[in-house]
Image: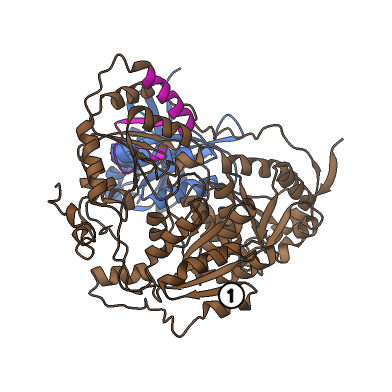
């Protein structure tokens, strides 16, 4: 017997069948039938204070848990407020299902109250979207949406639900499998390609592994580690790939790219074989494309065939799931090891170790409270075990540079879209998904104010997130670029922290705890106090306002052309290491 | 370089918008696009002529494939496929030159589908080159209006 129910009931039932345990959102006129049903559902409802917060929280939840995040917003402004969050999830390949209310089908296209063409607006920033016109389609659409969101290269899927469809009736029926004739992601890598890759790896003199977010998405960290360790190959990771390979591992070179380590960037310039796994050769990674990795052949492993050959030519492309491919690749290498002679790599490894020793990440410790010091202390006091969310800009880069990640799904940051205001709601989502973990949002004073209203959500949901604001009174990365490339003309980048806001008072106004820290000596005590507090805590670190993120590859410059040592010369910190640069 | 892509898509609302949006967003140039039903009611065929370099053609194909409603993409080789286009042309005619124009239409195996005192509408099908040649020949008489369908194509044999 098929059950008769309303569209709203079918939606909630379908969400329950997908195993959804939590929804982030805000109700509104055309979503009322859905929220009416949700009231009785065991699914946890998290009422955010802005729809952008709902999308980012669902995103943070998804990244921390590996499950699909779900957010909900009403038609018109509710839906358009989700847009940034959806675009963010799209750029970082995060599985998200966004459900939006829509005006009744007979009003669509009439510019009705709170009407927006949500499927049209979101088309370029979703993996797929649906405008449901018939209540009977709801179970299939929800099933397909979740399937599409989490499989292949994950991404956001939007379901736009007109109010009359929510109110309409249907006989509930759920298929065993979604029917999607045009959607068959390739998971198993091509055997011949894998053997070619295995040979190339064995024959390479100066190989490097370049690990991206895809390693984390596919859960391929153990296989990646095996590839690195069994072949003694050094690993660099992207921002999204942070935690894919333990950063404290002797084979880790740290992050590469614009604010990557010199070691990683120099290695990319000298390597003869790049093994790219789940990474997409983004412009922040390659620097000047025509001078990127001039000596290298490239093995490119990615689940999305469109990423292969998009920015750089791949010599050995392998399409499929990273975990599966790396497993097969490791087996192929073991099998071929005796047939293929591997050149002596001692010189290459020595060169890398030399770079690592000569060019560590460093900063000038003199002159007040340094943002890098704050991150270092958070790292030390949390023993590297916290989940770190970040905002976007300098705070994000310092978090990436100084909080070493040894495990996947613990560094949650807006990589592709670079969304300021991502960190706080993402931290709430991550905390709800991983209630036993300690969650920090390493924030900037500019970014955090873009979604600061979510402090209310954090307080009411009882998520004890710690918001460590590296408060420099500037849109710091903007100011840094203005300093370096626009003659120090600080046009519209100063936020005047002396005048507004008082983050401690603001925290207290929301019912959270606020602590201001101005001296290095106060840092540890404040962090420990925050860690012990059972509530959300805002740590307002007044850091050196003109501290810059170094090293840095200027936009459009090649990777070897790194700036930063002029201001913080290596000799100053390690006089014994001052030598000629290698290039 | 021009390529003709034959794209089978699910016959669902919004598919054309998705394809058009993709081309616009990724900066690919569409020369022509024709959509119609196929032998299966749930499937439509889009014949898209794109003007891109070999490297971007691969991107076009891969990006198209990422659309959930796209089922199959074939890059049609002109050697092994048949392509046709239809043009409707409204040509200015006078009693003096009407028979001359009709002669040209006959040579191109066109059909006159409408006649008035000052003009005729002619339908011609064929390859894009043939239609171009026809257009060039009748232009001196005065083309009042013209519409081309864009290319449709199928692979030969099998």
Residue A374 image position (x, y, % from top left): 42, 64
Q: Is residue A325 magenta?
A: yes
Residue B51 image position (x, y, % from top left): 32, 42
Residue B117 shown left or right of residue A309 in the figure? right
Residue B7 shown left or right of residue A205 in the figure? right
Say which residue appears at 58% left-offset and 75% top-offset: A507
Residue lying at the far top of the rendered structure: A339
Front-lying residue, B125 or A141: A141
Q: Around disc 1, counting alpha carbons within 10 Å, would you say few (fewer than 14), some (14 to 19), or many (20 or more)?
A: many
Residue A134 shown left or right of residue A215 in the figure? right
Q: In the rendered image of this protein, which colour is used for chain B?
A: blue
Say which residue appears at 61% left-offset and 56% top-offset: A431
Say which residue appears at 75% left-offset and 57% top-offset: A34
Front-lying residue, A272 or A469: A469
Q: Which residues are magenta?
A: A306-334
Residue A350 shown left or right of residue A388 in the figure? left
Q: Looking at the picture, does residue A42 appear above or below residue A391?
A: above
Front-lying residue, A397 or A273: A397
Residue lying at the far bottom of the rendered structure: A499
Residue A385 image position (x, y, % from top left): 52, 50
Q: Quadrant of residue A342?
A: top left
Residue B142 image position (x, y, % from top left): 32, 52
Q: Is residue B149 magenta?
A: no
Residue lying at the far left of the rendered structure: A580
Chain bearing tag 1 is: A
Secondary structure of the residue carrying numbered label 1: helix
Tell me the brown chain: A
Residue assigned mark 1: A507
């Amino acid at each position: 017997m098929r059950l008769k129910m309303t569209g709203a009931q079918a939606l909630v039932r379908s969400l329950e069948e997908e195993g959804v345990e939590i929804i982030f959102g805000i109700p509104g006129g055309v979503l009322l039938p859905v929220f009416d049903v949700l009231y009785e559902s065991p699914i946890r409802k998290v009422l955010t204070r802005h729809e952008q917060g709902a999308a980012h929280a669902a995103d943070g939840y998804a990244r921390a848990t590996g499950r699909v995040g779900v957010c909900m917003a009403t038609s018109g402004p509710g839906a358009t407020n989700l847009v940034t969050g959806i675009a963010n999830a799209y750029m970082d390949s995060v599985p998200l299902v966004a459900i939006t209310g829509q005006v009744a089908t007979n009003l669509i296209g009439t510019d009705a109250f709170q009407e927006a063409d949500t499927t049209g607006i979101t088309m370029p920033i979703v993996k797929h979207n649906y405008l449901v016109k018939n209540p009977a389609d709801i179970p299939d659409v929800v099933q397909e949406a979740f399937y599409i969101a989490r499989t292949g290269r994950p991404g956001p899927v939007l379901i736009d639900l007109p109010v009359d469809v929510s109110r309409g009736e249907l006989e509930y029926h759920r298929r065993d499998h979604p029917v999607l004739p045009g959607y068959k992601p390739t998971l198993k890598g091509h055997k011949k390609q894998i053997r070619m890759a295995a040979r190339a790896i064995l024959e390479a003199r100066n190989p490097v592994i370049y690990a991206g977010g895809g390693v984390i998405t596919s859960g391929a960290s153990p296989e990646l580690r095996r590839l690195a360790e069994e072949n003694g190959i050094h690993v660099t990771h992207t921002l999204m790939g942070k935690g894919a390979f333990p950063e404290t591992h002797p084979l880790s070179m740290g992050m590469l790219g614009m604010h990557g380590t010199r070691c990683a960037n120099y290695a990319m310039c000298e390597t003869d074989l790049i093994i790219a796994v789940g990474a997409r050769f983004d412009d922040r990674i390659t620097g000047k494309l025509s001078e990127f990795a001039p000596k290298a052949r490239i093995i490119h492993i990615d689940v999305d065939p469109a990423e292969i050959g998009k920015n750089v030519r791949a010599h050995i492309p392998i399409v499929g799931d990273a975990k599966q491919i790396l497993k097969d690749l490791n087996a192929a290498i073991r099998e071929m090891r005796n047939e293929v002679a591997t050149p002596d790599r001692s010189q290459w490894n020595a060169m890398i170790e030399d770079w690592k020793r000569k060019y560590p990440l460093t900063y000038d410790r003199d002159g007040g409270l340094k943002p890098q010091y704050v991150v270092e202390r958070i790292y030390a006091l949390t023993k590297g075990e916290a989940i770190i969310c970040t905002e976007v800009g300098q705070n994000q880069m310092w978090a990436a540079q100084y909080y070493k990640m040894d495990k996947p799904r613990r560094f949650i940051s807006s990589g592709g879209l670079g969304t300021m205001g991502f960190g706080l709601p993402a931290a709430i989502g991550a905390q709800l998904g991983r209630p036993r973990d300690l969650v920090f949002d390493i924030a900037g004073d500019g970014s955090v104010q873009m979604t600061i209203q979510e402090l209310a959500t954090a307080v009411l949901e009882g998520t004890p997130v710690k918001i460590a604001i590296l408060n420099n009174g500037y849109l710091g990365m903007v100011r840094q670029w203005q300093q370096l490339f626009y003659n120090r003309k600080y046009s519209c980048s100063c936020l005047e922290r002396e005048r507004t806001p008082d983050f401690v008072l603001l925290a207290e106004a929301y019912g959270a705890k606020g602590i201001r820290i101005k001296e290095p000596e106060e840092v540890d005590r404040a962090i420990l106090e925050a860690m012990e507090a059972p509530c959300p805590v805002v740590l307002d670190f007044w850091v050196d306002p003109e501290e810059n993120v170094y090293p840095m590859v200027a936009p459009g410059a090649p990777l070897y052309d790194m700036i930063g040592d002029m201001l913080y010369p290596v000799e100053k910190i390690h006089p014994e290491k001052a030598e000629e640069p290698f290039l | 370089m021009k390529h003709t892509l034959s794209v089978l898509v699910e016959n669902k609302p919004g598919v054309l918008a998705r394809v058009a949006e993709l081309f616009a967003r990724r900066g690919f140039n569409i020369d022509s696009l024709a959509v119609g039903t196929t032998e299966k009611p749930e499937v439509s065929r889009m014949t898209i002529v794109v003007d891109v370099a070999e490297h971007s053609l691969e991107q076009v194909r891969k990006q198209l494939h990422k659309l959930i409603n796209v089922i199959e993409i074939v890059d049609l080789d002109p050697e092994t496929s048949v392509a046709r286009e239809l043009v409707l042309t409204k040509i200015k005619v006078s009693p003096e030159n009407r028979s001359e124009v009709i002669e040209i239409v006959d040579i191109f195996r066109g059909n006159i589908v409408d006649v008035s005192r000052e003009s005729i509408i002619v339908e011609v099908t064929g390859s894009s080159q043939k239609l171009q040649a026809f257009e060039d020949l009748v232009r001196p008489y005065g083309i009042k209006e013209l519409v081309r369908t864009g290319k449709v194509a199928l692979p030969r044999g099998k």
